[in-house]
């Protein structure tokens, strides 16, 4: 009888311990323990936003597909470019294994790592009843053959900036094209805009420089310029340049000539 009584006491104690346990959170990927190299440039795929009420009922669901990239550097800095001007900051991983941008500042944002592989990354941020899921894929820098085409002007976004702010973006449409040739030469032709006569065509040399996926024009010459390749598809090209003299960011969109 004592033997059976002891067994029941042990079982009752086990039940009590299980009942008193705190709720276990959903397992998250901890980048501290990751064997996958996430310190690289990630291409933006989509941003999904779900809004819930206090009863956790879904009120709204939206998904957008912005252009740009998210670069995680091994010196605990990051560069973010997504439908706007580049943003720089610092990152870290907290004790909860969350990926934190701008830790310890008013702009701090905490993300759970939902998925990570060699070619994909998914981060999720929860702000009360708002859940934001951001998906990325490995960014592929272009090679020379992928750029050796005539790219027709689509439009340009000019964003003047000051010491601590970016002013209203200006949308410009100007006829013309950007021809990148296999012999490392280029031709830039711009049409008239706002009634002004077109500038003379420009010819020179071009190439690709790393790091940064940069298209460099007229390297080692007084008129050297470099552009970040923000997006390259089968029929479109988006490049970005900061003019520190004029204090303007240029985001230039092209479509492949047919």
Image (cartoon, rainbow, N blue to C red):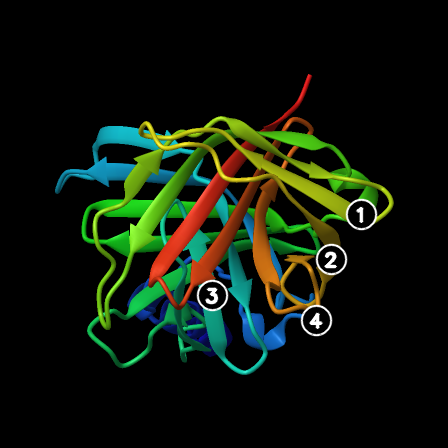
Pointers 1 and 3 in contact (C-beta within 8 Å): no
Q: Nearer the viewer, mark 1 or mark 4?
A: 4
Distance between mark 3 and mark 2 Cα atoms: 20 Å
- Would you say the residues marked 3 and 2 are in contact, meaning their CB atoms lie under 8 Å apart? no
Dot placed on the residue nearer the N-terminal end, 1 or 2: 1
Look at 48% across and 42% down and name the residue there.
252
CA gap, disc 4 to disc 2? 13 Å
| Nearer the observer, 157 or 135 | 157
Nearer-N-terminus badge (1/3): 3
First in sequence, mark 4 or 2: give its number. 2
Question: Mark 4 sits on what residue?
Answer: 220
**Residue under label 2:** 208
**Are the residues at dot 1 and dot 2 in contact (C-beta closer than 8 Å)?**
yes
**Residue shown at 56%/73% (left/top)?**
73
SS at circle 3: strand
Name which of mark 3 and mark 4 comes first in the sequence.
Answer: 3
Q: Name the residue tied to disc 1.
A: 144
Instruction: Give the structural element (helix, strand or loop) at label 1.
Output: helix
Q: Residues within 10 Å of mark 2 (few under 14, many from 20)?
A: many
Return the disc, 1 or 4, that comes first in the chain's sequence: 1
Q: Residues within 10 Å of mark 1 (few under 14, many from 20)?
A: some
| Measured Cα–Cα span from mark 3 to mark 4 | 26 Å
């Amino acid at each position: 009888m004592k033997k059976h009584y002891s067994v029941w006491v042990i079982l009752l104690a086990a039940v009590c311990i299980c009942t008193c346990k705190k709720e276990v959170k959903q397992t998250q990927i901890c980048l501290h323990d990751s064997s996958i190299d996430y310190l690289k440039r990630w291409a933006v795929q989509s941003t999904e936003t779900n809004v819930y009420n206090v009863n956790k009922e879904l009120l709204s669901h939206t998904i957008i597909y912005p252009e740009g990239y998210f670069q995680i550097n091994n010196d605990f800095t990051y560069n973010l470019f997504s439908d706007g001007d580049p943003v720089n900051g610092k990152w870290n991983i907290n004790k909860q294994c969350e990926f934190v941008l701008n830790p310890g500042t008013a702009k701090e944002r905490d993300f759970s790592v939902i998925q990570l592989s060699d070619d994909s990354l998914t981060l999720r941020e929860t702000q009360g009843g708002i859940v934001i899921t951001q998906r990325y894929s490995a960014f592929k820098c272009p090679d020379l053959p992928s750029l050796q085409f005539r790219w027709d002007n689509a439009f340009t976004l000019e964003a003047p900036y000051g010491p601590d702010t970016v002013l209203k973006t200006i949308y410009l449409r100007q006829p013309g094209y950007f021809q990148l040739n296999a012999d490392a030469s280029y031709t830039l032709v711009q049409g008239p805009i706002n009634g002004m006569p077109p500038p003379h065509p420009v010819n020179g040399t071009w190439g690709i420089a790393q790091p940064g996926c940069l298209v460099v024009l007229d390297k080692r010459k007084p008129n050297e310029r470099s552009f970040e390749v923000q997006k390259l598809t089968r029929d479109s090209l988006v490049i970005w340049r900061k003019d520190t003299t004029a204090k303007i960011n240029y985001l230039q969109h092209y479509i492949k000539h047919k």
